[in-house]
């Protein structure tokens, strides 16, 4: 059994066995076992009421946590509505948000509440799927208390996780899903950094078997015949040799379908305005059917199977990951897997790669490993002895060339009728650029070709190549295209997709 003791000093101890309180006149002597040591706290009898009822400014000191994260409580003048709440209401709001997360999760089990209804308090839960005794606590940080005894920071702590680095990232992601319930009271800046780190460190989805959406599988013989005719041996030889191929008039899109796409309500900004200003949406086949582009969708999804059968892909030293195989290495992404992108007047996309070299952040660009990590995550969150920091340095500052995802071949089908070169918006492909480490330098170091985004044109290219979308010059035309990234899942040390999080994302 575990006993929770909350002395008036504000420190919460968790002991391995129940320990009695022994009264000695006007004082009580409290023996507390903490990791094989005994600590004697002496408090006066008139403080005993505070001992049993006050739960302000608790710290969890079960043992040094494997990971912890600080949440500063918002002060006067900061954005958020926390300043309209009393201290009790702030504490109750945070505890309620924690409880809501636990109740909605399949991996968390609620622990007994301590000090419920007393404002700032400790909340805790167990995560048995992450370790037999894996425990999470969310509590006021005692050392942060102000002159009134109110905490200025909360601390999230994790203990006894089997895989602490990855599991703590998952925990942060679960909390981030409930950010609307806490962002008015505490700052979530450090939380966002941790969620980004977790997402960007996960192996990408290996996708689904390309044969599931082949022309034969969907019973579309006409589509199979079309692919055999237009994506023929000559086109495939150019793709193998040059890394790209342009196929004109493969399948045009009607004006009525374009009108439906223009009114599609699921479009959103990318949150990367410094390097791109387009509007995107990811669609599945039901969405494509609603917008009248189901044939274009089927064409893109059938390409991977066609290329598996016809294309002589470059040799890879890495073992494939299911559902990819040596014989059929290409897969299709899962879920809403086709991107619809729109570019209006003055919109652009800077040089980039769909599967960039995710190399070490070299010191000449980012400073030392220590400086980069401290700048991104803060040395108050992780000290330099944590396994997290060592792993971060190994992954981000190694000299090994690694790709950022499994994307292998990019397929873009252009949809807009009547697009001329004078309208701008050309896709600029930088030749022989698959090993270019810094995309923007390709403008100075590599030759390029421009692809005009005319209706019905299909562009296939090696996803590693650097390319850009030049600025749209026409004042009213919308440049619109569908994109599918055919993936090649392999045991290649890929470190994950690149995620961005807006404050409201």
Image (cartoon, helix red, strand yellow):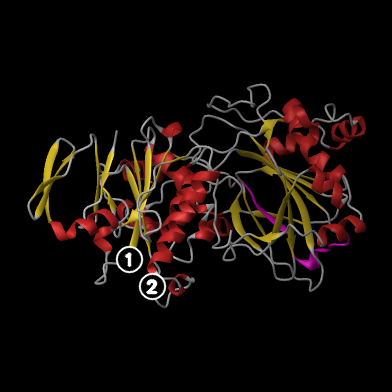
Q: Which mark is residue 152?
A: 1
Does the residue at mark 1 contact the one at mark 2 (Cβ under 8 Å)? Answer: yes
In the image, is 226 to the left or to the right of 188?
Answer: right
Q: Secondary structure at mark 2?
A: loop
Neighbour tally class for label 2: few under 14, some 14-19, many 20 plus, Cα within 10 Å: some
Whole-percent x and y of residue 170? 47, 43
438 and 389: which is toward the camera: 389
In the image, is 349 to the left or to the right of 497?
Answer: right
Whole-percent x and y of residue 479? 78, 61
24 and 17: which is toward the camera: 24
* Picture quadrant of residue 349: bottom right
Magenta stretch, residue numbers: 417-432
* Residue farthest along the left direction in this orientation: 25
User: In the displayed structure, would residue 382 be above or below residue 167?
Assistant: below
In the image, is 218 to the left or to the right of 339?
Answer: right
Whole-percent x and y of residue 62? 26, 42
């Amino acid at each position: 059994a575990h006993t929770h003791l909350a002395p008036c000093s504000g420190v919460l101890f968790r002991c391995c066995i129940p320990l009695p309180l022994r009264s000695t006149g006007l004082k009580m002597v409290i023996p507390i076992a903490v990791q094989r040591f005994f600590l004697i706290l002496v408090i006066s009898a008139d403080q005993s009421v505070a001992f049993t009822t006050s739960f302000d400014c608790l710290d969890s000191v079960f043992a040094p946590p494997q990971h912890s994260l600080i949440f500063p409580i918002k002060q006067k003048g900061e954005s958020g509505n926390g300043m309209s709440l009393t201290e009790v209401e702030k504490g109750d709001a945070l505890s309620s948000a924690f409880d809501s997360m636990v109740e909605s999760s399949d991996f968390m089990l609620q622990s007994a509440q301590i000090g419920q209804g007393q404002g700032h308090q400790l909340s805790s839960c167990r995560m048995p799927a992450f370790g037999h005794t894996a425990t999470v606590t969310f509590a006021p940080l005692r050392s942060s208390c102000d002159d009134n005894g109110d905490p200025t920071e909360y601390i999230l702590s994790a203990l006894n996780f089997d895989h602490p680095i990855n599991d703590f990232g998952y925990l942060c992601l679960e909390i981030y899903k409930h950010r609307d319930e806490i962002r008015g009271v505490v700052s979530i800046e450090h939380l966002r950094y941790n969620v980004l780190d977790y997402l960007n460190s996960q192996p990408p989805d290996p996708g689904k078997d390309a044969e599931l959406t082949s022309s034969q599988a969907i019973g579309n013989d006409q589509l199979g015949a079309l692919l055999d005719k237009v994506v023929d041996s000559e086109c495939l030889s150019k793709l193998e040799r040059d890394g790209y191929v342009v196929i004109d008039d493969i399948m045009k899109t009607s004006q009525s379908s374009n009108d439906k796409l223009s009114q599609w309500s699921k479009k959103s900004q990318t949150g990367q305005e410094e390097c791109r200003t387009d509007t995107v949406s990811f669609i599945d086949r039901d969405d494509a059917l609603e917008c009248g582009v189901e044939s274009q969708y089927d064409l893109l999804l059938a390409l991977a199977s066609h290329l598996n059968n016809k294309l002589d892909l470059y040799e890879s030293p890495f073992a494939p990951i299911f559902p990819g195989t040596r014989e059929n290495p290409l897969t299709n992404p899962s879920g809403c897997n086709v991107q619809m992108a729109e570019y209006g007047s003055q919109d652009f996309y800077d040089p980039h790669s769909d599967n960039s070299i995710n190399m070490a952040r070299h010191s000449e660009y980012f400073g030392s490993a220590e400086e980069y990590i401290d700048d991104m995550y803060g040395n108050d969150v992780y000290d330099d002895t944590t396994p997290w920091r060592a792993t971060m340095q190994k992954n981000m500052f190694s000299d090994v060339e690694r790709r950022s995802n499994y994307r292998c071949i990019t397929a873009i089908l252009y949809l807009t009728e009547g697009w001329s070169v004078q309208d701008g918006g050309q896709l600029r492909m930088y030749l022989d650029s698959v090993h270019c480490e810094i995309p923007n330098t390709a403008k100075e170091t590599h030759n390029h070709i421009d692809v005009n985004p005319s209706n019905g044109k299909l562009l296939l290219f090696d996803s590693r190549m650097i390319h850009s979308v030049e600025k749209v010059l026409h004042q009213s035309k919308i440049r619109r295209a569908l994109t599918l990234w055919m993936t090649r899942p392999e045991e290649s040390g890929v470190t994950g997709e690149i995620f961005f999080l807006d404050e409201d994302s």
